[in-house]
Image: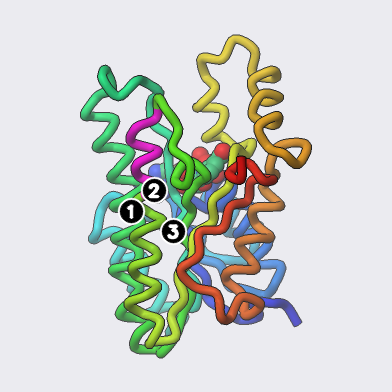
């Protein structure tokens, strides 16, 4: 018996990186996973590999997010888990010379997308008298990072928004938490390091920030996510959990 047997789980941004690894682990634990992403080809491949279904979604578009939720209810009758995970890092620049275009794009995906996801799924979870929301934050939402103003602000916003939703909906047996990984090797990191002269030493530099040796792995993030969406964390809500080898304790 898996930890998520027969649970219906939507994961946004599941065509790649952390979301993909969570889709694989949740499915291995018995969940029926809806792989929701903008990327259709890779999203369909991930969905097929985990025995789930693919749903195209643009999390910046409230109607697209609502469609994702309603299509899942129509297919499965309920939604037990929503993981709002889609996100981008955006461009690196000091705030003084950063662009409004970058601010709006990062906020639209990382912040509006999480809000739209929770706004659409909450009526379903309230009606069914329970559910679990897990949002992907970041250690930069706990400890600010320079040169990424929109990303840092969006991740801090996700943490507080999630806590507010957790408080509001606890009476409906709905839990809402955030995972806050430090740097993880994914396509997002490759984009972040696109101007690095020596990506390997940049990786080693990131790893050296964590008191525990090495970088956080996708597997470690997915296992923490599994804990927060399963009954193992039945009385845990409104938590922003660092998965950072101790980085934010410094
Ligand atoms: P990734 O680039 O591998 O995956 C992100 C996914 O989001 C992609 O599949 C992409 O298609 C999807 N996506 C982007 N815009 C979308 C949109 N508008 N609608 C639907 N899907 C969209 O990156 P990742 O590192 O796996 O990032 C996943 C989450 O983890 C993000 O929220 C990110 O901020 C967070 N995070 C990443 C790291 C890291 O170091 N990689 C650290 C902390 C937090």
| Horizontal and vertical percent position of residue 115 | 30, 60
Q: CA distance from mark 1 to mark 3?
A: 8 Å
- Residue 76 visible to an observer of this rendering: yes
Mark 3 crowd level (few <14, some 14–19, many ≥20, 10 Å Cα): many
Query: Which circle marks residue 156 in the picture?
Result: 2
Image mark for residue 113:
1
**Mark 1 Cα shell of 10 Å, populated few (<14), some (14-19), many (≥20):** many
As helix, strand or loop, the secondary structure at mark 3 comes to strand
| Residue that appears at 34% across and 88% down | 127
Q: Earlier in the sequence, mark 3 or mark 2?
A: 3
Question: Label 2 CB, ligand 1: below 8 Å?
Answer: no
Q: Is mark 1 within 8 Å of ligand 1?
A: yes
- Contact flag, marks 2 and 1 (Cβ < 8 Å): no
- How far across and down, in percent of the image, does residue 225 sit? 60, 62
Q: Main structural element of the magenta stretch: helix, strand or loop?
A: helix
Tag 3 residue = 84
Q: Nearer the viewer, residue 112 or 26?
A: 112
- Give the residues in magenta: 148-156
Please report the residue visible at 40 percent of the width from the left and 39 percent of the height from the top: 152
In the depicted structure, whether residue 6 falls above or below residue 99: below
Q: Does residue 150 belong to the magenta stretch? A: yes
Foreground disc of the pair 3, 2: 2
């Amino acid at each position: 018996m898996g930890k998520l047997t027969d649970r219906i789980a939507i994961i946004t941004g599941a065509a790649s990186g952390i979301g993909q690894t969570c889709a694989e682990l949740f499915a291995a634990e018995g969940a029926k996973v809806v792989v929701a992403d903008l990327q259709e080809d890779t999203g369909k491949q991930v969905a097929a590999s985990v025995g789930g279904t693919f749903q195209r979604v643009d999390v910046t578009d409230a109607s697209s997010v609502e469609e994702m939720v309603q299509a899942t209810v129509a297919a499965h009758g309920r939604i037990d888990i929503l993981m709002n995970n889609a996100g981008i890092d955006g461009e690196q620049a000091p705030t003084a010379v950063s662009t409004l275009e970058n601010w709006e794009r990062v906020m639209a995906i990382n912040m509006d997308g999480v809000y739209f996801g929770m706004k659409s799924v909450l009526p379903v979870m309230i009606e069914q008298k329970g559910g679990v929301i897990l949002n992907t934050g970041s250690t930069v939402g706990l400890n600010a990072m320079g040169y990424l103003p929109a990303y840092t602000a969006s991740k801090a916003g996700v943490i507080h928004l999630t806590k507010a939703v957790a408080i509001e909906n606890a009476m409906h047996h709905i839990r809402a938490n955030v995972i806050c990984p430090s740097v993880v090797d994914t396509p997002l990191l490759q984009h972040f390091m696109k101007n690095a002269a020596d990506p390997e030493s940049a990786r080693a530099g990131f790893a050296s920030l964590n008191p525990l040796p090495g970088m956080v792995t996708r597997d470690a993030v997915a296992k923490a996510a599994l804990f927060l969406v399963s009954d193992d964390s039945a009385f845990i809500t409104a938590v922003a959990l660092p998965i950072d080898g101790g980085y934010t304790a410094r």
